[in-house]
Image (spheres, grey):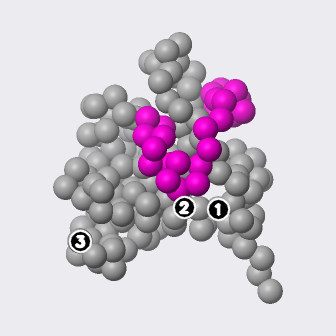
Amino acid sequence: MDRQEISVRTARLSDAETIARITAAYAESGIMLKRAPENIIENIRNFFVAEIGGRVVGCCAISFFTLHLAEIRTLAVCDAYKRNGVGTMLVNKAEGILREEGVRSSFVLTLSPEFFLGLGYKTVSKEMFPQKIWRDCTTCPKLMECDEVAMLKELQIVVSS
């Protein structure tokens, strides 16, 4: 598959059901927490989707924690399109938006650290993100036995002239 066939855009309300379906497969496998369709709708402007031939095949979202720190989350790609650059393009789009907003660092909690290492993220302690833990992790069934790896990337800020 040619990466030129893949386009990434800001999600629309009409994408919410597809995002819920794509992420549900990950939740069923224990890779991410299930997100209710209502939660996706509430946060739709923070989502990006990857399309191939007009079909949504992947998604990710951003979540702001401070003026200079944001999380890239809910990264999911349909099985048939994995290992074709879709995930990388989604993360690149999210990082581009964060740079434009002046965010200095992005972080992830992931079960796929190798993927993010390849994108320039470094492994760090989860304790660096108490806001994340208090906001999201306290309701996670894995809270006491979390197997996710925290990773951080310093972003190069876009300076407009």
Q: Is residue 146 above or below residue 89?
A: above
Q: Which residue is pictured at 43% across the width and 40% down the height?
A: 112
Q: Which residue is pictured at 24% across the width and 67% down the height?
A: 55
Q: Is residue 139 above or below residue 150?
A: above
Give x and y (percent) for residue 48: 45, 61
Give x and y (percent) for residue 86: 36, 62
**Residue numbers of the magenta segment:** 110-135
Q: Quadrant of residue 33?
A: top left
Work out how far the residue at label 3 is from the one at label 1, CA to CA, in angstroms. 28 Å
Q: Which residue is mark 1?
A: 98
Earlier sequence position, callout 3 versus callout 2: 3
Give x and y (percent) for residue 97: 61, 66
Label 2 element class: helix
Work out how far the residue at label 3 is from the one at label 2, CA to CA, in angstroms. 22 Å
Outermost residue on the top side: it is 144
- As for residue 128 lying within the magenta part, the answer is yes
Check disc 1 and give the amino acid type. Answer: Leu
Q: Which residue is mark 3?
A: 1
Marks 2 and 1 close (CB-CB < 8 Å)? yes
Q: Which residue is mark 2?
A: 94
Residue 64 visible within the image? no
